Image (cartoon, rainbow, N blue to C red):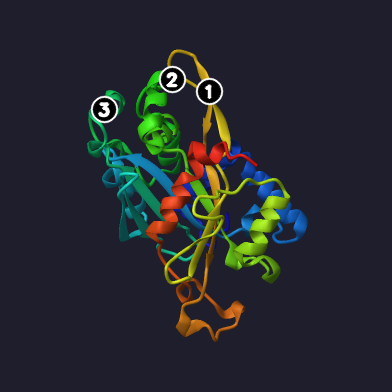
Amino acid sequence: MKFATHTVMTQILDALFAVYAQRVPDVKKITQAMVDKGLVNSQADIINDHVAFRTMGVKNLGIASFEKIFLAHGYEKRDSFYFEIKKLNANWYAPPTPDLPRVFISELKVDQLSETTQKIIYKYTNTVKSDPVDQLDVMDVKDVATYFQTPLWELPSLEDYEHLLTESEYAAWVIYNRYYLNHYTISVHDLPQAYNTLEPFNSFLTSIGIQLNTSGGEIKTSSDGLLRQSSSVANQVLATFKEGATKSIAGSYVEFAERKPLPEYNHLNKKDLKREHRREGFETANADRIFESTFTTQLYQKG
């Protein structure tokens, strides 16, 4: 990822990205193809629109805990979102400097699930007796990076995982993957002109064998037409469960965002457009479909 500054937060994000890229083979596959095509010289040239994390909305965890890390580094809380069918809340956070990505944090409203499902989730999360972020030195790169990769609860059993999958695929994802980076986002509008919109870029992705999320169409477009998003289908990881059983499950994925200029800035040349001239924030309907990049309906598409 490309950073103009060298701060604790840029180092934390680099540490997170290193682990994420190892778990998601599509990351390096896409980057290498972009280098081969001459779109970028290296990963460092790709501008990261935003990163996203998933959490459990329970005591000591969830957004209220997780956001503390980013607020401490100058991020500002912006819009809130609610996803009724998926039973999720989310917030996005604006970075203190324009080289940093936006942050999108979601949480599962556990108390809205069935009693059986709640019991399964609480069996694991109730072992967290205090807010773990309060125990961190949020200014210590290693401390924070380790936190993101450290399990907060014990490995789930395969039976529990599969039950969660039937009611909330989001719950199943979090109970196993915990706080691994859910996705990073390639800023498509910052690419060379022939590939700076989603139609040609998606065609390029398909040509190199990247499977795209088709929920709501390959391109999800905001009501104002200014925010357009697509995503890969999550790479699968071989998960080992509590009893030693293994199963291939959804890991993380890559997103692609195209933010069009706001109408009052349409007259500007592309080279003069800055972040503040383009559509900001997120869109509930778009995000709702992007969540499904880890869902079985996408993982096992026929085609």
C-alpha separation, residue under disc 3 versus residue under disc 1: 23 Å
Q: Quadrant of residue 29?
A: top right
Q: Which quarter shows the N terminus?
A: bottom right
Which class describes the residues within 10 Å of circle 2: few (<14), some (14-19), or many (20+)? some
Residue 39 point in image, percent of width and height: 71, 61
Task: State if disc 2 and disc 1 touch (CB < 8 Å).
Answer: yes
Q: Determine which residue is flagged by label 2.
A: 158
User: Would residue 241 be seen by someone viewing this image from the given angle?
Assistant: yes
Q: Mark 1 or mark 2, which has the lower sequence index?
A: 2
Q: For mark 2, give the secondary structure.
A: helix
Q: For mark 3, give the secondary structure.
A: helix
Q: Above or below — where is 279 with respect to 249?
A: below
Report the amino acid beneath label 2: Leu
Residue 3 circle label: none
Residue at left offset 67%, top offset 65%: 195
Which class describes the residues within 10 Å of circle 1: few (<14), some (14-19), or many (20+)? few
Q: Determine which residue is flagged by label 1.
A: 247
User: Would residue 157 be seen by someone viewing this image from the given angle?
Assistant: no
Residue 147 point in image, percent of width and height: 40, 36
User: Which one is in front in this view, the residue at disc 3 or the one at disc 2?
Assistant: 2
